[in-house]
Amino acid sequence: MSRPNDAPLAVIASRIRMEEKLIFAALARHGIPYDQLDERSLVMALEDTAVPYAAVINRSISNTRSLYATRLFEARGIPVVNRSQVIETCGDKILTSLALLQAGVPTPRTTVALTPEAALTAIDHFGYPAVLKPVTGSWGRLLAKVNDREAAEAILEHKEMLGSPAHSVIYIQEYIAKPGRDIRVNVIGDRVVNAIYRCSEHWITNTARGAVAQPCELTPDLVELSLRAAQAVGGGVLAVDLLERPDGSLIVTEINHTMEFYRTVTATGVDVAEALVAYVRQVARL
């Protein structure tokens, strides 16, 4: 079934942050009609093949709801930004690391263990300090830097007691001695839009954890590596996180499929929402 020529866009969002407000404002500037959908109340009959939207901008902060909502719209032939394959890969740190490795993108040494006992042996072999991360999650939550075996034993015991299946998979990553900052790069389609340094005295340099955003120059190396990383996970609207090694070389750590860009806008003055809407128009062929 084809969609009507005047079909609006849909914006999936249950929490309206500054990013969503900027997207709504950009859509309004271009006179593009849209419906805001709260995925928590979304109901879609699988046999219903109606195509009510030209495209969907998915801004859900729930990885599970985001993934399944996208699959439901894709099943009707409606393009979604980002695609379900991209959400699936970026929503899982193991899948992201595998995609980066397969594409030859430099990324920290990573080991995965499936029990606390195996993880302890793996960390001993890996070397201290090491970083333990949840396989899913964002905003720098539940990250742990373990400096010795006693710390590793304590963290692994806590993870086991939490009881969640997600905590039974131990993601162990090399600790990079970064220079008090990391780099976040926003990629939209085949374009690097802007980048910021996230500066903090803490080893976790996430703005959600208090890091300060400062503008970062888009050097050729940074642009080339960020585009390669984005393509490795399927492309779209993505935030690529990079670290600088002590020798100055760049390394990709994570890729976020629900880009939070308000702080990059205030730090760089680049209108990310405008670039995002232009990309969605291209995808939807508006």
Image (cartoon, grey):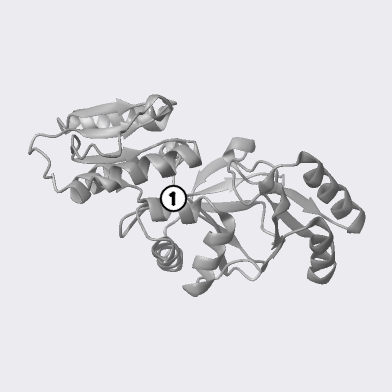
- Closer to the camera in the image, 180 or 76: 76
Q: Residue at x 30, y 26 (%)?
A: 36
- Closer to the camera in the image, 165 or 37: 165
- Closer to the camera in the image, 244 or 39: 39
Q: Which residue is drawn at 59% across and 60% down?
A: 94
Residue 88 image point, x, y percent:
46, 53
Q: What residue sits right under mark 1 in the picture?
A: 87
Q: Which residue in the rendered view is the most extreme toward the right?
A: 150
Q: Is residue 208 above or below residue 106?
A: above
For residue 13, which quarter of the picture? top left
Residue 130 image point, x, y percent:
77, 60
Q: Residue at x 33, y 27 (%)?
A: 37
Q: Which residue in the rendered view is the most extreme toward the left?
A: 5
In the rendered view, does 88 fall on the left or right side of 204? left
Q: In this view, does 229 lie above or below 188?
A: below
For residue 118, which quarter of the picture? bottom right
User: Split into 4 quadrants, where in the image is the C terminus?
Assistant: top left
Mark 1 surroundings within 10 Å by alpha-carbon count, few (fewer than 14), some (14 through 19), many (20 or more): many
Q: In this view, does 165 lie above or below 37?
A: below
Question: Considering the numbered disc 1 on the image, is that residue within a helix, a strand or a loop?
Answer: helix
In the rendered view, does 168 fall on the left or right side of 120? left
Residue 121 image point, x, y percent:
84, 66
Q: Can the viewer see residue 270?
A: no
Residue 17 image point, x, y percent:
43, 27
Q: Can the viewer see residue 165?
A: yes
User: Split into 4 quadrants, where in the image is the N terminus?
Assistant: top left
Name the amino acid type tagged 1. Ile
